[in-house]
Amino acid sequence: MNKVLMQGNKVIGEAAIRAGCRFYAGYPITPQNELPEYMAENLRKVAGGVFIQSESEIAAIHMVAGASAAGARSMTSSSSPGISLKQEGISSLAACELPAVIVNMMRGGPGLGNICPSQGDYFQATRGGGHGDYRTIVFGPATAQELADLTMDAFDLADEYRTPVMILADGMMGQMMEPVVFKAAKPRIYPESYVMKGAGTGKSKIIRGLILDPLDMEEHNWTLDRKYQVISGKETRHEQYKTEDAELILVAYGTGARIAKGAIKRLRETGLRIGLFRPITLWPFPTNELRDLAKKIENFLVFEMSTGQMVEDVRLALQGRARIGFHGRPGGVVPTPVELANVVLRKYDRKEGLTDYY
Amino acid sequence: MKKVFGRPQSMKNNIFHYCAGCGHSIAHRLIAEVIDELGIRGITIGVPPAGCAVLAYNYFDIDMIEAQHGRGPAMATGIKRVLPDRVVFSYQGDGDLAAIGIAESFHAANRGENITVVFMNNAVYGMTGGQMAPTSIMGQKTTTSPMGRNNVLDGYPIKVSEIFSLLPGTAYIERCAVNSPANILKTRKAIRKAFQYQIDGHGFSLVEILSPCPTNWKMTPIESCRWIDEVMCKPFPLGVIKDLPAEAGDEQKKGDKRHAG
């Protein structure tokens, strides 16, 4: 496969089609419109491929649920306010154990906010988002290449665990162009017995999340929880960048991590040994991997394009074993690597350590 | 001995949880009989709603997938587009279809999705205890319109079938009732026609069924059946509202005659 230069939103579309996605429903919202447009043009060319421009975000996610139950690899995408609307359906997908891939190209919020890149939906994505006891697997890609790879992996994980998987990126990731190589898709492994296609001559099937008996409902919750425990143990992904000799670790994901890498390059030129810990799965959060770093490093500075959401997971991971500072730029502001480098210089002193921390 | 009456194969041998005099159990049975008659049990997928009929899958012996409140037609759309050779229907109450799910229902109809919607109109929210529905009639007393439905405060009953009939995407719409043997037979015929049209690929069909809810209407079953005839049928007159395939068939016959002549 040759390297191609592609815009992030289209990369997801192409990766999804290559991964065998055969159903997409979505509603227009900036900054992710190129993805439904890509699907309208290209998914419909594929045998059995269905694209529907739905009347709402809510309809889109429930169409996806129906298509998923009927056996198609299914996807929807949106941006922050639209993802809020989809939460009813995401909760339902989790309850009914239906696989699906949901893309959130985050924008500034709360409310209508703006259309600029932001990371303000971390809580919503990683804590479940909708009602009830459930989790969704969440990927936080930082390059177009990762958009491609993780989109394909998202379909595999959704099938393996029969659960919705979210790609959490932002307007910048969706809009920028980068070179990408599409990997070969794995063959789909999804037992026919999960698919609802009519009872045939056999026993009829029910897919539901309504369980009126509290003890049965409790057991269903624990069953789901056991699955989430397995995912937590097996599916964490992260990247460490220049952490071997680091005296301070920046913790950032997605677009924030790109900015952090730029800042680290500049800071290393001044002699400060700064590294990066980049969660790739935001849920499950790479807790143990981050905690291991705290055995030899005392200073962690979390950078997010929000007022501070992932920083809570960092605190939970480190459990008071290190100093944790925070720098945030919410509301659609994308700071420069120079700004972040200056923040580190202001907050960190080699003798004193982090001077401004929790 | 020859068996003259039995449980449809598409029904499970379970006792209905519905109240005495409720129309759901009749409608369920009619649908099951039609599924048997058309021989489509193995290829039919049903989408029950939130509300009293949420447990429809305890009674139908066909594949069924629960929809969130009002989202049945969206879910049915997803299923039907992936499996176009299956028969897909949603079963929805008046709150489900005409209030919280009006957008999903309206747009599925407008896209001409080749699905069937069975619309149970009992002018009240049943399961939650008798609140005002979008189809509650003027002056109707409910727990949330205790002085009677008042257009200034509560708006008007929505005539779903008439409104949907204006959409080019809808093929067949009929309003029926299950309050008398004659009406029940007509309802059965309508359901059969709706499923047959779907099998023939005519597009969106909707069968509205005026259905008694004695518990929340605070009436006896017999009073409820009478109330449908005497009161409910005024804003919601029974009959075929739209039947494009039949009209096209008539045109075809006329054309054939002219050609023959």
Image (tube, coloured by chain):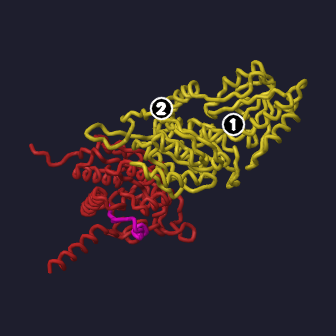
Chain colours: A yellow, B red
Q: Please state the horizontal and vertical placement of residue B57, each as a whole percent of the image.
A: 36, 43
The residue pinned by badge 1 equals: A253
Q: Please state the horizontal and vertical placement of residue B101, each as a whole percent of the image.
A: 48, 57
Question: What kind of element bears circle 2?
Answer: helix
What crowding class fits label 2: few (fewer than 14 Cα within 10 Å), some (14-19), or many (20 or more)?
A: some
Q: Between residues A240 and A135, which one lies in front from this camera angle? A: A240
Amino acid type at mark 1: Tyr
Is the N terminus of chain B in the top left, top right, bottom left or bottom right quadrant?
Answer: top left
Q: Between residues B261 and B241, which one lies in front from this camera angle? A: B261
Which of the two discs, 2 and 1, labels the residue nearer the N terminus?
2
Looking at the image, which residue is at 49% across and 54% down? Answer: A40
Left or right: B97, with A131 as reference point: left
Viewer can see residue B187: no
Looking at the image, which residue is at 34% across and 55% down? Answer: B23
Tell me which segment is drawn in magenta.
B162-178
Q: Is residue B169 magenta?
A: yes
Amino acid type at mark 2: Glu
Number of marks in picture: 2
The residue pinned by badge 2 equals: A160
**Relative to A223, is B18 above or below?**
below
**Relative to A131, is A114 above or below?**
below
Q: Please state the horizontal and vertical placement of residue A296, each as a whole percent of the image.
A: 77, 19
Looking at the image, which residue is at 59% across and 41% down? Answer: A180
What crowding class fits label 1: few (fewer than 14 Cα within 10 Å), some (14-19), or many (20 or more)?
A: many
Q: Is residue B157 magenta?
A: no
Is the C terminus of chain B in the top left, top right, bottom left or bottom right quadrant?
Answer: bottom left
Q: Please state the horizontal and vertical placement of residue B217, each as a whole percent of the image.
A: 42, 59
Viewer can see residue A60: yes
